[in-house]
Amino acid sequence: MVVKIILIVTLILCGKCDGFPLRFANYYESHMVLQMAPKRANIWGLGTVHHRVDVFIDGKNVSSATVDTHSQWRLLLPAMPKGGPHDIMITSGTENATIHDVLFGDVWICSGQSNMGFTVARLENMSTTISEAQATNGLRIFHVKNIASNKTQREPQIDGSWQHPGNDNVTKTFSAVCLLYALELAPHLNRPIGLVESAWGGTPIQVWSSPDAIDACKHHGATRATPHANSVLWNSMIAPITPMTVTGFIWYQGEANAGHAAAYQCQFTAMINDWRAKFRASSHQNATAKLPFGFVQLAPNANKTIHSGWPDLRWSQTAGYGYVPNPSLSDVFMSVAMDLPDFNSPYGS
């Protein structure tokens, strides 16, 4: 009798200790872009363990999943043509949640250090760029918050929410390179484009690399990331978004590794291969094996003859070939910046 009473009290106090209230993962929000056909967009969230979750697009039941023992559910949506808007609703028992104004198109991850983080507000033609972005139908932006973690996080911290670019602080503080890239693509593709910025100034490649990528280069003269610890931004700003089905990546980074340029050749190749593998594995193998990966060549920073490691870093960015794609870096493309110096502007301007 005492045992039964204890059990009943425990169950009452526990409440929903076997899971969470039904919801989408925090970056699946209204106004977002999900990956279009031929890929199938992966979505996930939290709920009560062993409960069934059904998903509806515009009222039509399109898929279902069961919440696992980690209180997590995942499923692939049907391959959806470009466009929208759509309402996506999830239900489980009496619970439900809905995200509105969802578009299907291409999703790009924009990452790196300060040059990727360089904001729209600092562009000479800021007003023109914002006006063009506002006029681009189907363009949406999203910003992962700058948080470091020694442990892999299930969800990222986020700055704001998915939104269409506007004349506001969210757009003005968004990555200029990322936004300009989309504005260049948009007229040629005629489809929605979702941009996910995950960048942090002054950071070396080691903090963006998973432990697997770090281990792949441990015999190539790679040094530990300083003052940051290895993998701390992978843990909090990349790993949590790997379940998102994406089109590809663009990357602007390298300054923080110029002092160890030789090691960067292995580090960059390992990170690219690892990101591709991790995004593919986390999206039910739905991502292509070699997601497109673009990077900006390290631009000149001083009109001097001194050897600063930057020329060697540029060479390492191409895995020692001087061009991409190549046998070590397939499906990789480069924006050449060697001929675009700006020696007179103060740093950060």
Image (cartoon, rainbow, N blue to C red):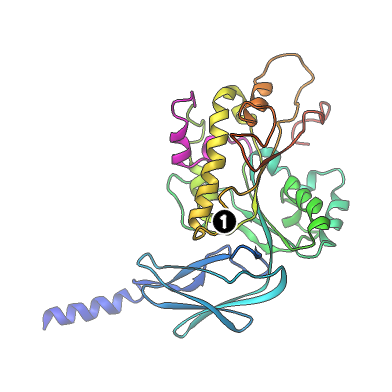
Asked whether 210 falls inside the magenta stretch, the response is yes
> Magenta segment range?
201-222
Image position, residue 206 (x, y; %)? 52, 35
Image position, residue 267 (x, y; %)? 54, 33
Task: Determine the residue located farthest toward the left in the rendered image.
Answer: 1
Tell me if mark 1 has few (under 14), some (14-19) or many (20+) residues whose alpha carbon lies within 10 angstroms of its own. many
Image position, residue 97 (x, y; %)? 55, 77
The answer to whether residue 1 is above or below residue 22 is below
Task: Determine the residue located farthest toward the front in the rendered image.
Answer: 327
Identity of the amino acid at label 1? Ala
- Which residue appears at 40% of the width and 68% of the height? 71
Image position, residue 65 (x, y; %)? 45, 73
Q: Quadrant of the C terminus?
A: top right
Q: Secondary structure at mark 1?
A: loop
- Which residue appears at 65% of the width and 70% of the height? 80
Question: In this view of the protein, which residue sits in the foreground, 65 or 299?
Answer: 65
On the image, numbered disc 1 is attached to which residue?
287
The answer to whether residue 192 is above or below residue 275 is below
